[in-house]
Amino acid sequence: MRELLSLMLIGGALGIAASPALAGEAPHCSLDASAPVIKAANQPGAVGVETPAAQAPAVTAPAERGVAGGVLAAPEGADKIPILNHIIRTGAKLLDLGSTHGLKSVVARNGEQFMVLQIAPDGEAVVSGPQLDLSVSTLLTIAGSQVRELGEKHGLRGFYLQNGPEFQVLYATPDGQATIAGVMWDSSGKNLTREQVAPIAGALPTVVVGKDGAAGNAAEGQAVTKPALEAAEKTAFGTMGNEGAPRLWLFVDPLCSYSVRALQELKPLVDQGRVQLAIIPVSVLDYEDQNQSTPAALALLSKDPAAMAAAWEHREYRGAQAPEAAERLRNNMAASQDIGLRGTPTVVWRKADGTEGRVDGLPNDWSAVISSLGGDNHVAASR
């Protein structure tokens, strides 16, 4: 399972197949089945805030040297393969790794970050990760009843491997002689792996809150029951910035790369004294990071409110868990369901006219949000 996490580390940073912005939504880490973000357990990637520019870099970019001194060239005709053209349009550079077991492999690179991708036979989807020297027959022999077939998507057979409380999805190469442990995305940014495992009991998370153990109804698409600002003010949160500055409330999953980018974008405004942030940790991405979001949220909720945001900024998730942390997280999750949280970040604030402002996902224009803030718009941070 850890191997898969390392393979998925920088998918969000490249914005290659996980960006909801490419499908017309505000970028966010999703609770529903549409385009959640690839990310790692302990190192959230930086994802572009704005919709990627339409112009693509030249596919015939200069060759680059690999770590062993070899030369990797850009793949020929990449702009004519739908999924690769989609990746190019995000600004990532592609390098050709050749073809093995009937699949073309590429590296998608953005600065110092990169990801190995396997191109589906129809050119409409990718699977993240290198090929493993594990044939389908060997997998079935080893795993036995712990593996079930998910069917075929874009010419690739999927397999669901149960390993105790955890699971791994693998895709077989066309010849069945190798497998890929990873996530499949199509050219619209949809997470097809999540779609495939959704019918399997326990594969996707069910958030349960409240003393009666009843799940909130926000996940079922019912009406929001509480104003977001009212709910936010009753959460456990940490602050960053001048107490006298107008406040933005941010519901965040600590490991959501879009939440991380929100902090990165807002930090200069905090330093200028233009805004104060109230960070509300929640956990929505355990299904993608092998249950690492909940420990990260608990770690932050164990911090002093004044130190929580800085701990998140510096990824400080170690240390003893406070006895109250679990209850704080339960309360925050209850608030997230009360407001119909769709994903993270969700930004809430009081406008100058007293009405509530809210953006689900990363705003297209932070300046518009900041300019609408009222001066006296928050209460003191407390628990």
Image (cartoon, rainbow, N blue to C red):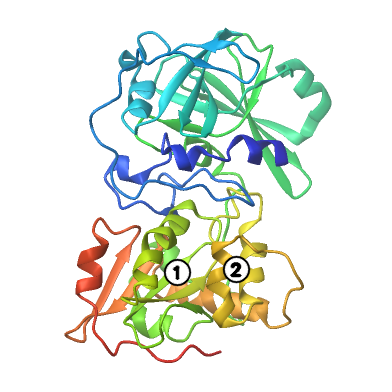
Horizontally, residue 354 falls left or right of residue 174, namely left
Picture quarter containing residue 296? bottom right
Q: Residue furthest left?
A: 353
- The residue depicted at 42 percent of the width and 46 percent of the height is 47
> Which residue position is annotated with label 2?
311
- Residue 251's disc is 1
Q: Tag 1: Cα neighbours inside 10 Å, few (<14), some, or many (≥20)?
A: many
**Vertical placement of 210 versus 316: above or below?**
below
Residue 37 x, y percent position in the rendering: 47, 46
- The residue depicted at 60 percent of the width and 55 percent of the height is 286
Residue type, numbered disc 1: Phe
Which quarter of the rendered picture does the N terminus lie within? Answer: top right
**Vertical placement of 49 versus 276: above or below?**
above
Horizontally, residue 58 falls left or right of residue 262, namely left
**Vertical placement of 12 versus 238: above or below?**
above
User: Which dot, 2 or 1, sits closer to the camera?
Assistant: 2
Residue type, numbered disc 2: Ala
Picture quarter containing residue 24? top left
Q: Nearer the viewer, residue 304 or 168?
A: 304
Residue 250 x, y percent position in the rendering: 42, 70
Q: Secondary structure at mark 2?
A: helix
Q: Secondary structure at mark 1?
A: strand
| Mark closest to the chain's N terminus, 2 or 1 | 1
- Residue 45's disc is none
Which quarter of the rendered picture does the C terminus lie within? Answer: bottom right
Horizontally, residue 178 falls left or right of residue 198, namely right
- The residue depicted at 35 percent of the width and 81 percent of the height is 229
Residue 204 x, y percent position in the rendering: 57, 51
